Image (cartoon, rainbow, N blue to C red):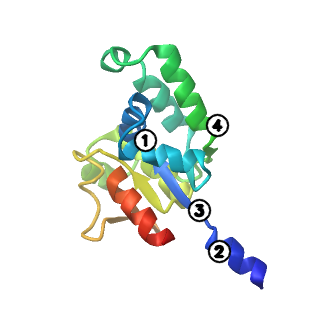
Amino acid sequence: MGETRKKTKEARFRVVIDTSVLIPALLSPKGHAFEVLELLFEGKIINYYSTLTKAEYYEVINYPKILKKIPLDVARERVDVVVFYSKRVQIKRSFKKSKTLLEKVHDPKDIPFLDVAYNAKADVLITYDRKHLLKIRDRVKKFKLGRHEFYILTPKEFIEFYKKKKA
């Protein structure tokens, strides 16, 4: 019985880190986005990705505005480290054909991150995407997709949430 309690107390948050958080964290070792990656590297949270979200991580580091700030080989190495510390989830149920969801989100590139949150049974989707993802959450910052409900938080909100829950 004591062993079960210990495991429960040490349970790690299951998260999905959106590209909008990954990029600023790769560019600077300061700020809330980088703090999220530190929690990942310290094993305090588990980040999940799919083949599609991983592909987006690598696609975005090739954008000219990113390449002006960081050499491609350095960016690739940093994304490799994030992927190494993360877990791949198989997408058994996808919402990419859901017209209702697309009407809410407006950006089809955000749906793979929602698919990961659903299939990984994530606690939190961490994003800076104020234009799409942050708009779909309810007043308590949650979003329900199918039968799974999870938070959609900015890195700052997540760090505050994490500290509060772990206190």
- Asked whether the beta carbons under mark 2 and mark 4 sit within 8 Å of each other, the answer is no
Query: Which residue, given by chain and number where applicable, does mark 3 sit on?
Result: 12
Q: Which residue is located at x 43 percent, y 37 percent?
A: 22
Circle 2 or circle 1, nearest the eye: 1
Chain-order first, disc 4 or disc 3? 3
For the residue pair 55 and 79, the one nearer the viewer reads as 79
Badge 4 density bin: few <14, some 14–19, many ≥20, Cα 10 Å: few
Q: Is residue 44 visible?
A: yes
User: Relative to residue 7, is residue 86 depicted above or below?
Assistant: above
Quarter of the image for residue 77 reads top right
Classify residue 128 by image quadrant. Answer: top left
- The earlier-in-sequence mark between 2 and 4 is 2
The secondary structure type at the circle numbered 1 is helix
Q: Are marks 1 and 4 in contact (CB under 8 Å)?
A: no
Q: Amino acid at mark 3?
A: Arg
Specify the amino acid type for callout 1.
Phe
Mark 2–mark 3 Cα distance, whole angstroms, equals 9 Å
Q: Marks 2 and 4, how far apart in space?
A: 25 Å
Say which residue label 4 marks. 84
Q: Secondary structure at mark 4?
A: helix
Quadrant of the image containing the N terminus = bottom right
The residue tagged 2 is: 8
C-alpha separation, residue under disc 1 versus residue under disc 3: 18 Å
User: N-terminal of the two: label 1 or label 3?
Assistant: 3
Q: Against 56, is 41 above or below?
A: below
**For this view, does 13 lie left or right of residue 108?**
right
Bin the neighbour count of mark 3 within 10 Å (Cα to Cα): few under 14, some 14-19, many 20 and up: some
* Circle 2: residue type: Thr
